[in-house]
């Protein structure tokens, strides 16, 4: 399932086309930057979860080492086939001319980077593919990473009265709104100190 929604305008209209992908076995979040418009889409996977370990396993002398197939690995080829299909689906949604930054917590992001590199080699394409380990990030954090990857300077804002560089604003009454007073360092107090002895 794929959902798409806009993420707002970027201030640099000349930005190169870049795509950021955050991926794990459960879902992929794709953030695209086209000019000044950024779009985010999510792709949910159908990869089954890993089976939990069975705990203590008895060793039976009658069974040779490596024999007697383990129930916890029986579904692993099925899971890997689903994972491979999911990675191909995600790579098909990425534009071939975009530089790509791939983030993720496990090894799935590395598999996607390998898939894109092999696909580019088969088709004679070249693009920058960066791959980094990353925890789960919010949409705003993904946007910030995309901005940094695209080379767009972060927006700086004046925050607080002491950073305000514009002239004082005026109230509706016409009187100037003065900035708050600065707090000065107070001189040390004499309380708690003993008087000098003579």
Image: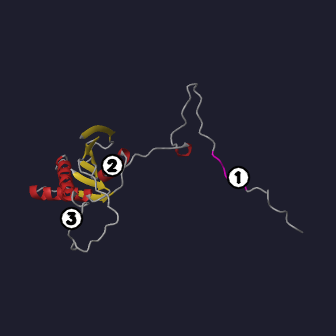
Q: CA distance from mark 2 to mark 1?
A: 44 Å
Of the pair 121 and 154, the residue shown nearer to us: 121
Q: Earlier in the sequence, mark 2 or mark 1?
A: 2
Q: Secondary structure at mark 1?
A: loop
Q: Secondary structure at mark 3?
A: loop
Residue 182 image position (x, y, % from top left): 63, 45
Of the pair 108 and 69, the residue shown nearer to us: 69
Circle 3 or circle 2, nearest the eye = 3
Question: Looking at the image, which residue is at 65% across and 47% down?
Answer: 183
Residue 103 image position (x, y, % from top left): 30, 55
CB atoms of marks 3 and 2 within 8 Å:
no
In the picture, the quarter occupied by the N terminus is top left
Magenta region: which residues? 182-187
Q: Which residue is mark 1?
A: 186
Q: Residue 186: within the magenta? A: yes
Q: Which residue is mark 2?
A: 147
**135 on left or right of 111:** right
Circle 2 or circle 1, nearest the eye = 2
Q: Is residue 104 above or below residue 10?
A: below
Q: Residues within 10 Å of mark 2 (few under 14, many from 20)?
A: many
CB atoms of marks 1 and 3 within 8 Å:
no
- By secondary structure, the bulk of the magenta-drawn segment is best described as loop
Quadrant for residue 169, please give it. Answer: top right
């Amino acid at each position: 399932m794929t959902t798409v929604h806009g993420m707002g305008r970027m201030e640099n209209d000349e930005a190169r086309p870049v795509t950021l992908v955050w991926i794990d076995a459960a879902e992929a979040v794709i953030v695209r930057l086209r000019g000044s418009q950024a779009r985010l889409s999510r792709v949910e996977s159908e990869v089954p979860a890993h089976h939990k370990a069975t705990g203590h396993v008895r060793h039976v002398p009658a069974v040779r080492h490596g024999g007697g197939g383990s129930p916890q690995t029986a579904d692993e080829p099925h899971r890997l086939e689903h994972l491979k299909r999911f990675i191909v689906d995600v790579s098909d949604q990425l534009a071939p001319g975009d530089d790509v930054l791939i983030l993720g917590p496990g090894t799935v992001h590395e598999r996607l980077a390998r898939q894109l590199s092999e696909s580019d080699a088969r088709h004679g394409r070249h693009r920058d593919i960066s791959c980094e380990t990353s925890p789960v990030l919010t949409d705003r954090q993904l946007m910030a990473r995309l901005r940094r990857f695209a080379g767009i300077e972060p927006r700086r804002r004046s925050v607080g009265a002491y950073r305000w560089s514009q002239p004082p604003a005026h109230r509706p009454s016409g009187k100037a709104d003065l900035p708050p007073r600065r707090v000065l360092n107070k001189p040390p107090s004499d309380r708690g100190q003993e008087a000098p002895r003579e």
